[in-house]
Image (cartoon, rainbow, N blue to C red):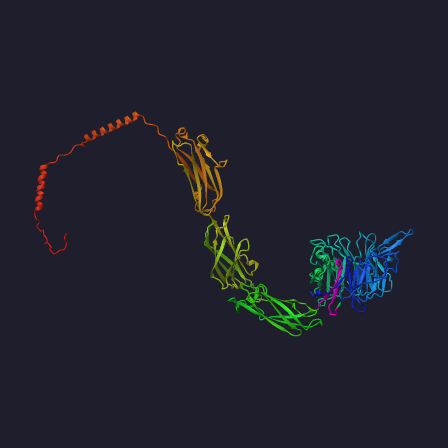
């Protein structure tokens, strides 16, 4: 960017609604007092000799050194040559275009709406819009008129006008419209009133606007100059290359599918690839893109035989911008030896307007612009509209060896003179202390940890190759190291500033820290951004040709000469967990073994992908590299854990570790199995990737301890009970740990309910009185209860004397058993709830009681007789005399002493009172 639109911009303003700036021209400062020419095609020559016409159009002559120093330039005495009886100059649009002779101090301008008047015998006037052009010296001393009116079959002559490159001819565009054919008139630029040579198309088809734009160029050799005319309404547009014999050498047809793109409305000839042959830029300002009238410019390059389409320029593709409405060569503004081009988009951003600058180079014309100047940029605090409708050729106005040019903004009646600035070639050498980074050499601290560091030295210098470049200059820069490294232990960017003197070198040194786990296949990018200091004191500060410098420093790898490090990783995984109980928190391990069968594996990772209802706890290291570590990533739909296997993971080695997980029990719906995938990543050949991924499937099982019971309230009905309410309760309780899914309860009511509704009735809150119940889910710790209520009539005891109980039967079923364990045989559950009836006993007759008493007496008497007959009541008599003799003999024997019996002596010294 070296067009200055702030301090070094000159301003010219015209009257409102005069289209001041619709055309512009910038001449070299020689004998002319003013060198800025500005067309205002809707202004009037009130300062020149009064011709009696209105809004003739005016050319203004302005100074390039002073703001608003413009005066009307009387290019021709409109009354002296032709009287008002044979011409009408009102609304002639004089100044609709301006072209300055590249070889002489003169310029040409036209008024394509000038009208000739034909008066018949009845003095009836007929107006013919033939147009006219005037050639005038820059100092206004001489002017001559190009006699277009000699040709009877033309209209709107002077719609476009252009000098040939040698300045010896003038090409005037004649608009093809109505019944008149279009084309060009070629005038020799000699003599006071030379005759032109019409080169018109043989016929006009549908107002094709042939001659709307004209140019010339040496396309096929460097000697002969061909004329070019635009035909913007020939279908979607066309451009014709013609020679002096009016032969069409080449026809360029628009490839647009849109009618009305106005391909050929503007033309620009330039040798953009510097091969000695002219090339052609064709504007199609009405070409739509994603929105209407975005505009485009098509570039055709010459191969010596014909012009061939090379590329298309688009600007910023803004709606209604009409990019390509103006195109001009603006010289070598970046001073690289190649010409540069400015393209106008006068209606961009709600008619504010803009110009785009394209810097050609040894590769030709780039597809992207180098600088954009908007109407707001050049407004200088004023309202700016239509900026970019016209762009002049470049001239070094302020003698700084840099081209400057004019830009018109006709809708706000303003013109800006934009000054280029000199270009400074800054030399910068970026010298790292080593050509490769050893990432295994931890040579500096980083927040208490060891890190890999290296130094970079910068050397700055410049040469004063332009007298406008100061001998000393203040510069500021920024060193950025990208995402793999950082500066000052925390940041990856560091700013600096210094004063540089021409012819001397200045050095700066920076310390760079490599971040942990870098991608060693990607080099460290060190980018230097340079700019002039904001407080620079130079009067006309230069522009840096190169603002960005880049150095790439690779990592040192142990992978042979090619540094490709082709590996062959293989992964295996296992777990001891047989199944996972649904909605039960449980911990388990996934053990992984990664083996490397080829070169060192740099930047190798193992990535675990698992459902979000699993929670990663920690990594268990068995046999891993020192820099092994794992980190989580929850940004995707599934959770992930990334584990670095080692940098490098050496060849022919294994990395063995395990990841511990916990089931959170928060899943909403059961699954047949949970999938945990493990995938390794490294630099491998496609055929070696098949064993880089494995998926562990852990069956998901469910267990629900279920309690199903029922009761009756009351449980017994007696004859004394009147009308009473009986409630049968059925209850289900889930003790877990898993929920119950798809549970149904089917109830069978007492049959008496249908047989005798007068004796028993069911009471329901729900009118449908359901007997089937469907529960989708019964979670752990939850229950479901069903109450069935009956009203029992007291007559039931007398009517149904043989009725023992009221019985309600229930079956509890589960639709799906496939995930449940340990209780499959328990289902379905069957229970019965009963309410017992007390049966009323009838009284016993008296004769039955008497008969029973008599029967009892008879049986007792019979029993006594039987016992007597068996001798139960008889006893033996005792012989008392023999008993007495036997007793006396035994007494006598007991009083005689035994032979060996020794009576012990009494111990009179014993303290014991009792033996």
Q: In the picture provided, is 26 more to the left or to the right than 457?
A: right
Determine if the magenta segment contains residue 400.
yes
Q: Position of residue 177 (x, y in %)?
A: 81, 53
Total of numbered circles in the picture? Answer: 0
On the question of residue 242 being in view, the answer is: no
Which residue is more in the foreground, 519 or 387?
387
Which residue is more in the foreground, 454 or 462?
462
Q: Quadrant of residue 734?
A: top left
Q: Position of residue 147 (x, y in %)?
A: 86, 60
Determine if the magenta segment contains residue 103.
no
- Reply above or below: 254 against 864: below
Location of the N terminus (image quadrant): bottom right
Q: In the picture provided, is 579 more to the left or to the right than 47?
A: left
On the question of residue 39 being in view, the answer is: yes
Which residue is more in the foreground, 16 or 817?
16
Q: Position of residue 46 (x, y in %)?
A: 83, 60
- Reply above or below: 357 against 726: below
The boundaries of the magenta stretch are 398-421
Residue farthest toward the right in the current orientation of the protein = 121
Q: Position of residue 525 (x, y in %)?
A: 60, 65
């Amino acid at each position: 960017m070296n067009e200055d639109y702030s301090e070094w911009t000159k301003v010219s303003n015209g009257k409102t609604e005069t289209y001041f700036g619709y055309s512009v021209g910038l001449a070299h400062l020689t004998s002319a007092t003013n060198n800025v020419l500005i067309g205002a095609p809707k202004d009037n020559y009130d300062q020149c000799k009064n011709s009696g016409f209105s809004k003739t159009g005016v050319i203004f002559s302005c100074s390039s050194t002073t703001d608003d120093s413009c005066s009307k330039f009387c290019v021709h005495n409109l009354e002296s040559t032709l009287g008002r009886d044979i011409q009408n100059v009102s609304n002639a649009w004089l100044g609709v275009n301006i072209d300055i002779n590249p070889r002489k101090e003169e310029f040409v301008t036209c008024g394509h709406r000038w009208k000739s008047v034909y008066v018949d015998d009845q003095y009836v006037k007929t107006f013919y819009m033939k147009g006219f052009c005037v050639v005038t010296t820059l100092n206004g001393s001489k002017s001559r008129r190009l006699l277009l009116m000699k040709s009877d079959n033309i209209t709107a002559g002077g719609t476009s006008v252009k000098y040939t490159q040698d300045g010896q001819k003038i090409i005037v565009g004649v608009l093809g419209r109505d019944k008149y054919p279009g084309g060009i008139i070629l005038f020799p630029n000699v003599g006071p009133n030379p005759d032109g040579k019409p080169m018109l198309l043989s016929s006009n088809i549908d107002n094709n606007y042939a001659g709307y734009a004209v140019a010339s160029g040496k396309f096929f050799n460097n000697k002969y100059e061909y004329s070019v005319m635009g035909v913007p309404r020939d279908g979607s547009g066309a451009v014709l290359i013609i020679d002096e014999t009016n032969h069409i050498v080449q026809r360029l047809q628009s490839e647009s599918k849109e009618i009305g793109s106005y391909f050929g409305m503007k033309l620009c000839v330039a040798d953009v690839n510097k091969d000695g042959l002219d090339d052609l830029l064709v504007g199609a300002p009405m070409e739509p893109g994603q929105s209407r009238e975005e505009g485009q410019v098509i570039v055709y390059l010459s191969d010596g035989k014909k012009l061939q389409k090379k590329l298309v320029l688009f600007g910023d593709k803004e709606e209604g911008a009409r990019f390509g409405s103006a195109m001009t060569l603006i010289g070598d503004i970046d001073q690289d030896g190649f010409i540069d081009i400015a393209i106008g988009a006068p209606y961009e951003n709600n008619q504010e307007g803009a110009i785009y600058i394209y810097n050609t180079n040894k590769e030709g014309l780039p597809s992207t612009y180098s600088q954009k100047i908007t109407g707001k940029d050049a407004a200088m605090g004023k309202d700016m509209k239509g900026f970019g409708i016209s762009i002049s050729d470049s001239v070094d106005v302020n003698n700084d060896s840099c081209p400057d040019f004019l830009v018109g903004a006709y809708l706000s009646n303003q013109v800006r003179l934009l000054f280029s600035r000199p270009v400074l070639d800054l030399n910068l050498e970026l010298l790292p202390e080593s050509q490769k980074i050893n990432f295994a050499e931890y040579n500096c601290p980083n927040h208490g940890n060891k890190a890999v560091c290296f130094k970079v030295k910068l050397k700055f210098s410049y040469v004063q190759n332009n007298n406008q470049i100061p001998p000393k200059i203040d510069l500021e820069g920024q060193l950025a190291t990208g995402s793999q490294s950082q500066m000052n232990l925390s940041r990856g960017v560091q700013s600096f500033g210094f004063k540089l003197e021409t012819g001397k070198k200045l050095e700066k040194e920076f310390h760079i820290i490599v971040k942990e786990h870098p991608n060693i296949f990607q080099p460290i990018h060190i980018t230097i951004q340079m700019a002039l200091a904001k407080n620079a004191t130079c009067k006309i500060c230069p522009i840096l040709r190169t603002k960005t410098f880049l150095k790439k420093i690779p990592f040192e790898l142990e992978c042979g000469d090619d540094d490709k490090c082709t590996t062959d990783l293989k992964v295996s995984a296992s777990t001891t967990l047989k199944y996972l109980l649904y909605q039960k928190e449980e911990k388990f391990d996934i053990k992984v073994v990664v083996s490397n069968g080829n070169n060192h594996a740099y930047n190798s990772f193992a990535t675990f992908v698992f459902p979000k209802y699993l929670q990663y706890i920690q990594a268990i290291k068995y046999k891993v590299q020192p820099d092994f570590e794992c980190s989580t990533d929850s940004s995707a739909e599934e959770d992930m854990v990334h584990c670095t296997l080692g940098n490098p993971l050496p060849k022919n080695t294994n990395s063995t570790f395990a990841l511990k997980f916990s089931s959170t029990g928060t899943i909403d719906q059961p699954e047949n199995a949970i999938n945990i995938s493990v995938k390794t990543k490294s630099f491998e050949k496609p055929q070696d990737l098949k064993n880089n991924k494995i998926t562990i499937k852990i069956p998901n099982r469910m267990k629900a301890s279920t309690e199903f019971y029922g009761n009756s309230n009351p449980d017994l009905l007696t004859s004394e009970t009147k009308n009473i309410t009986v409630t049968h309760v059925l209850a289900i309780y889930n003790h877990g740990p898993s929920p119950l899914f798809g549970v149904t309860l089917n109830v069978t009511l007492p049959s008496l309910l249908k047989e005798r509704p007068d004796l028993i009735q069911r009471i329901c809150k729900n009118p449908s009185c359901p007997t089937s119940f469907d529960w989708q889910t019964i979670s752990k710790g939850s229950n479901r209860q069903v109450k069935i209520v009956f009203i029992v009539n007291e007559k039931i005891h007398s009517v149904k004397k043989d009725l023992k109980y009221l019985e309600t039967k229930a079956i509890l079923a589960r639709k799906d058993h496939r995930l449940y364990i340990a209780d499959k045989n328990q289902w379905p559950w069957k229970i019965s709830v009963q309410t017992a009836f007390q049966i009323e006993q009838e009284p016993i007759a008296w004769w039955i009681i008497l008969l029973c008493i008599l029967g009892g007496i008879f049986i007792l008497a019979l029993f006594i007789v039987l016992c007597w007959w068996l001798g139960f009541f008889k006893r033996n008599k005792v012989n008392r005399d023999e008993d007495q003799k036997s007793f006396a003999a035994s007494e006598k024997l007991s009083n005689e002493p035994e032979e060996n019996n020794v009576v012990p002596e009494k111990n009179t010294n014993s303290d014991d009172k009792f033996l």
